[in-house]
Image (spheres, helix red, strand yellow):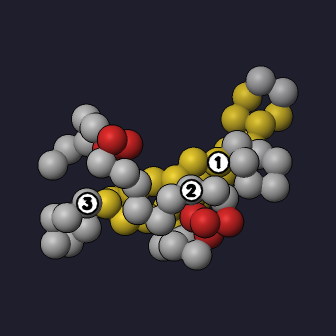
């Protein structure tokens, strides 16, 4: 959650190939049962800890992610 609306973190593969790093924070706002707005904060490494998202996801969280 990001001040109420649901939010999710997006990670990208690190340039050295050793895992993933924060890339964007997506905040989804609804109006009734429809999506009203999606706001993306790119490069939000400082926002991830404030949103209870890990700075670097665990290996288990990346299962199924492209190598």
Identify the residue shown where x is 25% and y is 35%: 64
Label 1 – label 2 distance at C-alpha: 10 Å
User: Which callout, 1 or 2, points at the residue further toward the start of the chain?
Assistant: 1
- In this rendering, the label closer to the viewer, 1 or 2: 2
Identify the residue shown where x is 30% and y is 48%: 59
Label 1: few (<14), some or many (≥20) within 10 Å?
A: some
Q: Dividing the picture into quarters, in which one does residue 61 lie?
A: top left
Disc assigned to residue 23: none
Which residue is nearer to you in this view: 27 or 32? 27
Identify the residue shown where x is 82% and y is 34%: 31
For label 1, the residue is 7
- In this rendering, the label closer to the viewer, 3 or 1: 3
For label 3, the residue is 19
Identify the residue shown where x is 64% and y is 48%: 7
Q: Dividing the picture into quarters, in which one does residue 14 lie?
A: bottom left
**Where residue 42 sits in the image (x, y, percent)?**
51, 68
Mark 3, secondary structure of its residue: loop
For label 2, the residue is 53
Mark 1 and mark 3 in contact (Cβ < 8 Å)?
A: no
Label 3: few (<14), some or many (≥20) within 10 Å?
A: some
User: Which callout, 3 or 1, points at the residue further toward the start of the chain?
Assistant: 1
Give the side of residue 5 with respect to residue 23, left or right.
Answer: right
The vertical placement of 42 against 8, above or below, is: below
**Where residue 36 sits in the image (x, y, percent)?**
74, 40
Residue 14 in view, yes or no: yes
The vertical placement of 64 against 33, above or below, is: below
**Where residue 9 sits in the image (x, y, percent)?**
52, 53
User: Which callout, 3 or 2, points at the residue further toward the start of the chain?
Assistant: 3
Which residue is nearer to you in this view: 31 or 4? 4
């Amino acid at each position: 959650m990001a001040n109420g609306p649901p939010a999710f973190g997006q990670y990208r593969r690190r340039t050295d190939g050793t895992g993933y790093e924060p890339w964007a924070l997506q905040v989804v706002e609804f109006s009734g049962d429809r999506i009203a707005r999606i706001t993306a904060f790119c490069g939000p490494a400082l926002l991830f800890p404030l949103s209870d998202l890990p700075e670097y996801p665990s290996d288990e969280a990346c299962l199924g992610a492209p190598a």
